[in-house]
Every structure is written in C-alpha cells, then in structure tokens.
Amino acid sequence: MVEFRYRTDEVTEQPSVTLDAFLDQSNATAVRLEPDDDARALIPFLDRLTLIEVAFPKFRDGRGYSAARILREAGYQGELRAQGDVLVDQIAYMRRCGFDSFAPEASLNPEAVARALANYDHAYQGAADSVVPIWKLRHG
C-alpha cells in the first residue's frame, strides 16, 4: 500500500467515473464506488485501476469499510480513497480496512489526524493491513 495521505487541496488527476460508467468503458483508471455499489464487480479490473474512491455520504454508513477490505484482500495495490463525511474518529479504522488516502468534506485538524493514527500501538483483530493482532503476539 502507498503512504497514507490526507487530501486538503484539489488534486489534478483523472476524474473518477461511476461503477456503471467504468464497467461500460475500457480506458478508465479511476472509479468511484457509492454505498450501494458492489466492490466485487471491480475485482477482474484491479490491475488497471490507479484510484478507487469510496463514497461516505454519512459517517454512520459503514459499507465503505467492507468495500475497502474486499478490494485489498482481492489484491488491489492502488490508491484507495475515502471521500465524504469522514471524521477524525474513523481514520484509524479506515486505514486498518485498507484506505490509504482520504478526502473529507469538512476540514480536519492535521494534529488531530496524526494523534488518531498514532493512538493505538496494537489491534485486537486482523484486518486488511499488516498489523499482527495482540492475541497473536501474546500466544504466537
């Protein structure tokens, strides 16, 4: 995975297309998944994608976490961006699920983001990242 990035400015890049538009063309390299989209539809195309943007229209909608984990476990190595109603409290969990960049609608305090990412040294369960669960460290 690439370095975790916080998007605070507009980045010039190929615009993301919807999943339906992506499946109907052969040259797109960036796609946007909405909460109702099935991330598994992208699995045959992961090698040509450079960006998958996952929409979080409401912070309480957790379907994007599942999409991220599905994509990472299927082998996706490109940028996986959480976009929308992203809160500081969610960032560490998003990273564990496989997100490596995020673009929140509301501005976040960079120091609070850094603290959120550094808050916990250990995890209790396995995830899409390479962190070894604490129980495995104890008993492994």
Image: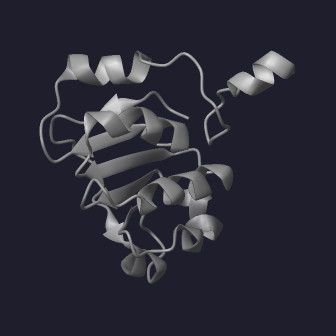
The extreme right residue here reads: 140
User: Closest to the observer: 134 or 25?
Assistant: 134
Image quarter for residue 46? bottom right
Q: Position of residue 49 (x, y in %)?
A: 50, 57
Horizontally, residue 61 falls left or right of residue 92, namely left
Report x, y in % for residue 9: 15, 36
Q: Residue at x 75, y 25 (%)?
A: 135
Task: Tell me, yes or no, if residue 108 can be seen here.
Answer: yes
Q: Is residue 75 visible?
A: no
Say which of 122 and 40 sits in front.
122
Q: Residue drawn at (21%, 41%), measured in percent from left and top?
A: 11
Quadrant placement of the C terminus: top right
Residue 84, given in percent of the width and then of the height, sits at 23, 53
Residue most toward the left?
107
Residue 71 or 59: which is nearer the viewer? Answer: 59
> In the rendered image, which quarter is residue 31 located in?
bottom left
- Residue at x 43%, y 58% (from the top left corner): 64
